[in-house]
Image: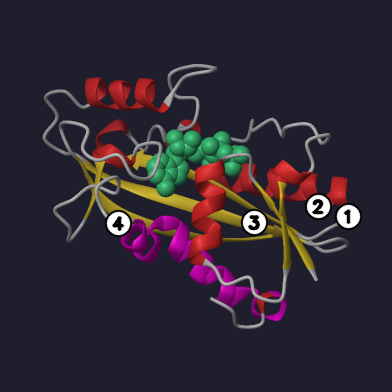
Amino acid sequence: MKLVIATRNPHKLKEIQAIFDFQGLEIYSSFDFPEIPNVVEDGDTLEANAVKKAVELCKATGLPALADDSGLEVEALGGRPGVYSARWSGEGCTYADNNAKLLRKLEGKTNRCAQFRTVMALARPDEQPQTVEGSVHGVIIEELRGDQGFGYDPLFMPDGYSRTFAELPAEVKNRISHRARALDAAANVWNDFFQGRK
Ligand code: ITT
């Protein structure tokens, strides 16, 4: 059985492969299909974008496709950047630009609660796509700390820890993260497809 992971983000791909035991499945990713155009992520929700990425890649390859759409939802910003997390500072922006914007937006705010949320969509040929999700709560600290991970990791300290996702060893992030929790749900809900693997 083949499965294609619908992402062009190498950090995400590495995390998904470290978290999940795909034993017995032949794994591909969007990087193996460079001729297939990038999906335009124009949905209003993580769910819509995850489904779009999975469905388009499934259609283009004829293979089951698993997509991850994730975002950082900050309470004091009404859930922003959320679905806009990747390009929050504009087309072509860097993780550093987005982190600088986040610190600016939270200047003087006492409520620094946030969550990372991942929606995973599985699209199989001739079947309705389905989604599961996972989240992790934490706070946005006041300066960047650590150089592991990617994206907003240097500013996000998960509840119960005194280090950011960018300071914690990858094994720890990959045990408690939004992505790990979504993959846990995926293994349970799509048990027929993943055959109980985690
Ligand atoms: P694909 O769509 O190709 O998978 P992407 O980077 O565009 O890659 P998203 O649309 O899901 O992925 O955007 C999510 C953004 O949210 C991502 O670019 C990061 O800025 C941030 N993000 C997602 N997961 C994260 C994590 O585990 N740690 C830190 N930041 C994360």
Cα distance in 3D space between marks 2 and 4: 33 Å
Q: Amino acid at mark 1?
A: Gly
Q: Amino acid at mark 2?
A: Cys
Report how far apart the C-alphas of labels 3 and 1 lie in the structure. 16 Å
- Viewer can see residue 181: yes
Residue indicated by mark 3: 121
What residue sits 73% from the left and 32% below the top? Answer: 38
Q: What is the crowding at mark 4: few (fewer than 14 residues within 10 Å), some, or many (at least 20)?
A: few
The reply to whether residue 129 is in sight is no
Mark with earlier residue (3, 4): 3
Q: Is residue 24 left or right of residue 142?
A: right
Crowd around label 2: few <14 · some 14–19 · many ≥20 (10 Å): many
Q: Which residues are magenta?
A: 170-193
Which structural element holds mark 4?
loop
Q: Could you say which is closer to the camera, residue 148 or residue 138?
A: 148
Figure quadrant of residue 106: top left
Do residues under tags 3 and 2 come within 8 Å of each other at their CB atoms? no
Residue topped by disc 2: 58
